[in-house]
Image: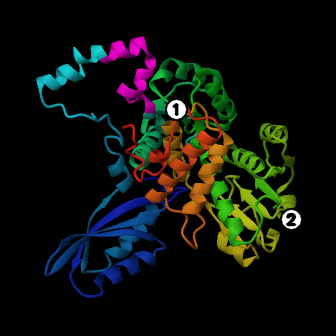
Amino acid sequence: MSDKTSYPLVRTLRFKSVNSPGMLGRITTVIGNTGTLIGNISMIHFGNRYVVRDIDVFVEGRPHMARVLRELIKIPEVKVVEVRDAVLELHKNGLVSVVPTRQIESVEDIRKLYFPGSREVCTLIKDNDTWKDTYTGIPYNVAIATNGTSVFDFPSGKPVVAMPIVEAKAALLNRLAGVNGFPIILDAPDTRSFVDAMRPIASAYSGIQLSNVSSKHCFDIVPLLEDELHLPVIHDDQQGNATVITAALINACKACEMDFKTAKIGVIGLGVTGLAIARFVKSYTGNAVWGSTLSEESAGRHRVDGGILSSIEDIMANMDIVIATTSRGNIISPDMVRKGQIILALSEPQPEIDPAVAMESGACLAINSKAINNLLCCPGLWRGTLDAQAQTINFDMYKAAAHAIAESATEGEILPTTLDKRVHHAVTHAVARAAVTTGMARRKLDDDYFENPDILKTPWM
């Protein structure tokens, strides 16, 4: 554990304490008094005289953890048994594996699956390769590809550093939408080498999701992969985030009785996510988006997209909706907030302005990045796209996903939670329907498909 981290670290404290009324409250109070957030509390052992519990705590490094332990050992009835790293335990041995979809119990099973049985299937595909859609897993295989050039605030280096992230994305795609995500680590630091590395393996997949690719190359890689490989391609930090933020803006505008399509909108920070948001907002509203950036390259892209270059001060003074993605905390002061504004301050770990401060300063609504997660979009987006056998994902499909996400939020919420199955069902069917309506679908989808309550069991499977 480092001495100080930018993000809270999760540690699990296992302790043994006397079984008496108020003891747990005393323990949590002591932990809370050290400025520590508490997560899950689990009972491990319950006895007549003592109990053993696990408590997850969020700490900022070694000194913080040491402070918590120092205070706990002052309670004579408590013994700290161990401190565990819950995150490392979860990632141990990886997050995904290849698991057969059929039982393999006998020699006969092996003969059918492998040899000589596989020859019959190979012959079918040799004669007509569309049989791959029936007799292989390719229709629901997505390559989650990274070169590791944008992993947190790390310097660009070893691509394998991104593996825990892409493994997690693969696991969640499968868990939430039944899509087979395959982590692909590429030693390909630039646009051309990345595309060239994907070309020889592309036939095993029906889509490509870029992950942790730097802004220097990601804007060019996506269209090149689409053009050269004829597969749907997304970058979760671009299209995934922009779709979810569009959903948030739909509901934020409803809450503030603002017309999304006529509101004046500005984006502060035109990096990977910020530029994608500006593009989505312009496509959704038809209006130019104001943008502020320190990068000449990003400024050029925004100008080509039809955006208006401005400053933080002018955006805060003139815009009804402000989306900030600068990676710099506390750059919006309270006196810059206009009454009635909608503010999305999305940088981590510190937002550009604390939402509570923005609300106190007159904003109608302000949120930070905690509610924004592209997992609300990507699983259903892929499932609907692959169900429809679309070769590209157009803006109408992203827009349909955004509306499905927004409509899945319960009253009082701006966005639903990522584990809400209703969201992924709604996004899947909305995207598939948009693919049909706009002529992107190569598979005919009928009422049996759209009335199906289980997106993991489509009529043809």
Check disc 1 and report the residue beneath it.
207
Q: Which residues are magenta?
A: 121-139
- Measuring 58% from the left and 22% from the top, which residue is drawn there? 229
- Measuring 48% from the left and 21% from the top, which residue is drawn there? 203
Magenta-highlighted stretch: main secondary structure?
helix
Q: Please state the horizontal and vertical placement of residue 240, each as a whole percent of the image.
A: 59, 46
Find residue 361 and report its image quarter: bottom right
Quadrant containing the C terminus is top left
Q: Nearer the viewer, residue 175 or 65?
A: 175
Amino acid type for the residue under numbered disc 1: Gly
Q: Is residue 328 left or right of residue 146?
A: right
Q: Which numbered circle lies on residue 317? A: 2
Q: Nearer the viewer, mark 2 or mark 1?
A: 1
Amino acid type for the residue under numbered disc 2: Ala
Q: Is residue 133 magenta?
A: yes
Q: Please state the horizontal and vertical placement of residue 271, each as a whole percent of the image.
A: 71, 44
CA neighbours of label 2 inside 10 A, class few (<14), some (14 to 19), many (20+) = some
